[in-house]
Image (cartoon, helix red, strand yellow):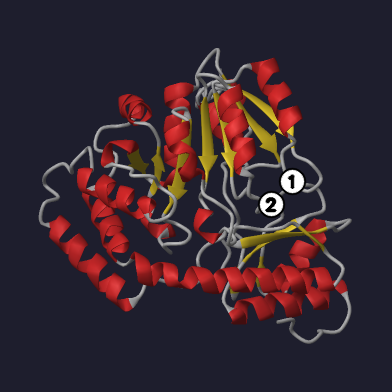
Amino acid sequence: MTFPPLRPELQGIEPYGAPQLDVPVQLNVNENPYGPSAACIADIAASVARAAATLNRYPDREFTELREALASYLNGDGGQRLVADQVWAANGSNEVMLQLLQAFGGPGRTAVSFAPTYSMYPEYARDTHTRWVTGRREDDFGIDPVAAKELIEEHNPHLILLPSPNNPTGTALPPGVVEMLCDAVGEGIVVVDEAYGEFRRSGTPSALEMLPRHRNLVVTRTMSKAFALAGGRLGYLAAAKEICDAIRVVRLPYHLSAVTQATALAALRHADELLAQVATLRAERDALVEWLRARGHRVADSDANFVLFGTFSDRDAVWQALLDRGVLIRATGPDGWLRVSVGTPAEMMAFKDALVDVTGGDVMEELA
């Protein structure tokens, strides 16, 4: 036996994580480039100070006030009369997803997604001893309903994980595909991961609207992206009360600290000002898609705050050349593709200048 006695299937595996490098332009992990407002920062500081006076006591393990506030927010973004008992939260949507796999996956059970998809999903399955099956997306990164239904009938999964907008492609799923999968999976759980939901284009509905019609549907969100709270680590979901109650069985005691709860509540009080930058980022994203396509790149349609583009015979060389010029993006997704987060206008200009320098050609006039 080797030391330490790590599980055999984990031996030799590198921990998940994008590069964290100190460079001038960091566009690799889909963060919101606009930090919280001064008013929000002051509210968070005051709220955390009040919480600090109670840190000798455990926090509210049901975080009732926060669940009520999250339900209220979601009801303004597609939710249909959600109440606190239909909302659950954890330390980032990563922990929310892991809890879902702990509750509904496990030995002898199967989880399904459609590649390319979020690279952490198979790790959740691995860590919970859940069998992992992936179907394939179409060339436009959509999901073929016929092929998807056949996959479900073949493997009879207990969970289906559907990022929408999809990471790393930015593709949003049509409601009809989600509803078909909810029906096809029977009593299995369909999880629509809307980590980037607030960035969806006008006319793209949230899966929250379907919750009253499908008791096996779960919609997850995060405060990391649109709320500019990646450092706060707060992810959450909306689902039937029975699903939320089931997750409570596997959650660790007092898993959301008093500081985390206070921070999230303060941010929700400032939702309007924090989300005011979402429209700016959408416009910057759409302009970036247009700019890239005008230069002959393939670009996936995006409803997120990032853009997948390509294709390159040696994407790692392009990634390194951009990094050498002070611009960090992500080499992820299908072979030959790269992903860039949407940043400030200055960051986008730095990326464009570096890309033109790397791939050849003159910097053309900005496209409106």
- For discs 2 and 1, the disc positioned in front in the rendered view: 1
Q: Is residue 80 above or below residue 23?
A: above
Q: Position of residue 121 (x, y in %)?
A: 58, 36
Q: Secondary structure at mark 2?
A: loop
Identify the mark at residue 141; answer none if there is no mark: 1
- Tell me if 86 is positioned left or right of 280 in this view: left
Residue type indicated by callout 2:
Thr
Q: Residue at x 61, y 66 (%)?
A: 27
On the image, the x and y values in percent for residue 294 come to 83, 73
Label 1, residues with CA under 10 Å away: few <14, some 14-19, many ≥20: many
- Residue 208 drawn at (x, y percent): 46, 44
Question: Is residue 11 at least partly visible in the picture?
Answer: no
Q: CA distance from mark 2 to mark 1?
A: 7 Å
Q: Nearer the viewer, residue 12 or 328?
A: 328
Check if mark 2's residue and mark 1's residue have beta carbons within 8 Å: yes
65 versus 62 height, above or below = below
| One can see residue 186 in this view | yes
What is the quadrant of the N terminus in the image?
A: top right
Query: Relative to 215, is 332 above or below?
Result: below
Q: Which residue occupies 44% across, 25% down?
A: 102
Q: Which secondary structure lies at badge 1?
A: loop
Q: Find residue 169 and name its label.
A: 2
Looking at the image, which residue is at 26% across and 62% down? 266
The C terminus - image quarter: bottom right
Residue placed farthest to the bottom in the image? 365
- 45 or 7: nearer the eye? 45
